[in-house]
Image: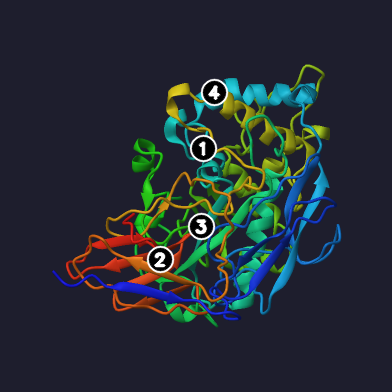
Amino acid sequence: MKKISWILISLFLSVPLFGVTLTLDKNYSGAPAPKIVATDDQGCLTGAPLPVPKRSGYVFRGWFTTSAATGGTQVILGAAGTKFTKDTTIYARWVEAVPIDMSKIPKNMKENFDWIKNDRYPRESYMPLAVPWDWYNTLFDQIWDGNGSINYGVRWESTKSITFEERKQIASMLQQAINEWMRQIIGMEGWPFQEISVKISGWAVSDGAKILDKQPNEVVWVNNNYDDPGPASADHPRNLIASAPKAMTRVNNLASIKKDMNYQYGGDPYARVDLYLWCTEYSFGAAGHGSWWGERLPSADVISAAKSGGAGSGVLLHEIGHGFGLYDFYGAVGVDKPPNTSDGGVFGQGDLKSFMWNNTGAKVINVYDTWQIRYYWDWIRTATPANANRFRPLPKDEEETPVASSSSKAQSSSSSSSSSSSRMSSSSSSSSLQISSSSSLNIKSSSSSEDITPVLIANSVEKNVEGTRIYFDGSRVLVRKTLSNGKVRIFDLRGKER
């Protein structure tokens, strides 16, 4: 037995542990004191989502760089998100809450949606809704399992390179596109989330040189792995295919998730890949594809849409809509399209124009599909079997506990790797750590048979020294030690094995 060693982490005044600090100003009179969080050592928010504050009568629309009701820049998570170079105050943005009353749904639209539910749905099985209810994999499910957050992996299947500025634009576009749909159901019965946190966990490429100006904190998976959860694969040039590690992806672990709603993804906490943005250079016979596995668009179209700002394009929003279970309407009336309504309304005309069929490329959801996604959420929520544990109660919110957890901390495991949970628990701590000056923390292993190398952490989100990794999981510092036999042990700062 080797002598058990202590890990001493010295933290000194004026040396930030995890980069720069962010003061989260809730931005209204009488608000609780601001929280202070910290970035990683590159000035980015690559860990847990930021807190979502609460304000009676208002809806939170994200953290911005200005206290004004308009303007400024929204803070985007991830290595390609917002980069801070100095201690900064960011501000909550609020809009007045508007109650959603499903009894106010227009009669002709409800007739359309009732037909979809009662006639078309039982006949079709290719969309996320049209599979057994216990499949748990609409975007509603994915966001719920992430406790108000969703993580993308980007498959860059192109012969062309992509710049860091383009990657930043794509990260911003995805934040806006997901929330363009989700803002329509904020405040509905059973939906506890407000602004959804969207992050790119990493980029999959067959050639790492395509990722220009790669940042130190960016995750890039370089491989030629064949992983095709989406459309038919005959049109895929084999040399361009790339994917995230299968253990990290939801699409490859549905059976396990179905059996265990606390399924532990491989990889680091918060690094899971819920779905893909699949950017392909080659033709695949459509302007886009979309479903539970993500969205597939031509790579040039993705770049163009992201550069245009906002939610990108109507095509992207259309494909995201499929992930919630919304259908295409390209076929005949009474087969794909709803029949005429009792007042003579014709689908696709007047106020019955669906963004999912005849949109004009707009970047905003129209009135018809606003009511459609509300109808779908109400449908899924009430149709879920009681024993399926599909939308189980989330951890109880405290006064300052974020709705979309600030530190939806993954359950640690002492198995093959540190991991993140498909249903992340909520806590009241912030997304990064703040420790008083001149403090010292000791880690003592009570069970390890090998030395854990002493590590000094300063101005970094994590350090790796001789098989020992120290990282922040959203609420606490953990030590991950890889032993000589390949097994992994995880300890907290009290020396308790997790």
Residue pictured at 27% horizontal, 59% vertical? 416
Estimate the x, y position of residue 245 in percent, counting from the top left.
37, 61
For the residue carrying disc 4, how many other residues have a C-alpha within 10 Å: few (<14), some (14-19), or many (20+)?
few
Question: Quadrant location of residue 239?
Answer: bottom left
**Amino acid identity at mark 3:** Ser
In the rendered image, is residue 341 in sight?
A: yes
N-terminal of the pair, mark 4 or mark 3, is 4
Secondary structure, mark 2, is loop
In-front residue for pair 295/169:
169
Residue 79 position in % (x across, y down): 56, 70
For marks 2 and 1 on the same chain, the one whose residue lies earlier in the sequence:
1
Whole-angstrom CA distance, mark 3 to mark 1, is 37 Å
- Left-right relation of 344 to 333: right
- For the residues labelled 1 and 4, the Cα–Cα distance comes to 16 Å
Residue 359 sits above or below residue 453 on the image: above
Q: In the displayed image of the protein, which residue is found farthest to the top?
A: 342
- Amino acid identity at mark 1: Met
The residue under label 4 is 383
Q: Quadrant of the N terminus?
A: bottom left
The disc labelled 2 sits on which kind of residue? Ile
- Residue assigned mark 2: 241
Q: Earlier in the sequence, mark 3 or mark 2?
A: 2
Check the image and report above or below for 15 versus 309: below
Instruction: In the rendered structure, find residue 475 and report the number of the disc placed on it.
Output: 3
Q: Position of residue 67 (x, y in %)?
A: 83, 62
Disc marking residue 127: 1
- The residue depicted at 63 percent of the width and 31 percent of the height is 190
Taking the image as drawn, is residue 304 in sight? no
Task: Give the distance between the C-alpha atoms of the residues marked 4 and 3, in whole angstroms.
Answer: 35 Å
Element type where label 4 sits in the image: helix
